[in-house]
Amino acid sequence: MDDKGGIQMLLAAEQDAQRIVANARSGKTQRLRQAKEEAEREIAAFRAQRDAEFKKKQELSSGSVDSNVKRLEEETDAKIERLKEEASSKSHEVTSFLLKFVTTVKV
């Protein structure tokens, strides 16, 4: 009977060991799954943060391009206006000079 009791104890111990190993594997699988989900959440948050920073920089740079274009257009318009004023103020002078040159005969 002692042998059967020892075998029964060994079988019970083996079953306990299998249960412990199964629980450990299950716990490990669960921890791995949880770690993976947490990593995915962190990656998504990081990606969202970087996308937001990129969009902000993109808006700032496109805004500065637009403001530069507007500033250059204003400067160009001012220069054109100044040249028109100069031309109109000197056109009478130039016309007089040309008429004098054309009508004067050198002998």
Image (tube, grey):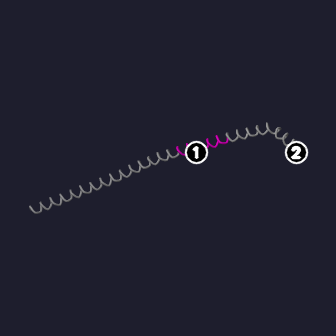
Task: Please tell me whether the stretch drawn in magenta is mainly helix, strand or loop.
Answer: helix
Q: Can you say which quadrant of the picture contains the N terminus? A: bottom left
Which amino acid type corresponds to the residue marked 2 in the rendered image?
Val
Q: Which residue is mark 2?
A: 102
88 relative position to 31: left or right: right
Q: Which residue is mark 1?
A: 62
Left or right of 37 in this view: 93:
right
Residue 7 lies left or right of residue 80; in this view the side is left
Crowding near the residue tagged with mark 2, few <14, some 14–19, many ≥20 C-alpha atoms within 10 Å: few
Q: Earlier in the sequence, mark 1 or mark 2?
A: 1
Secondary element under disc 1, as helix, strand or loop, is: helix
Q: Residue at x 54, y 46 (%)?
A: 58
Residue at position x 73%, y 38% in the image: 82
Residue with the most extreme front position: 107
Which percent across, then down, holds residue 42? 41, 48
Front residue of 95/63: it is 95
Q: Looking at the rendering, which quadrant does residue 24 occupy?
A: bottom left
Q: Mark 1 packing: few (<14 Cα in 10 Å), some, or many (20+)?
A: few
Residue 14 sits in quarter: bottom left
| Magenta highlight range | 56-73
Asked which secondary structure carries label 2, the reply is: helix
In reply to whether residue 50 is colored magenta, the answer given is no
61 and 89: which is toward the camera: 89
Residue sitting at 78 percent across and 40 percent down?
87
Q: Is residue 42 above or below residue 85?
A: below
Q: Which of these two is toward me, 61 or 105?
A: 105
Name the quadrant containing residue 60: top right
Q: Where residue 59 appears, x then y in whole percent?
A: 56, 44
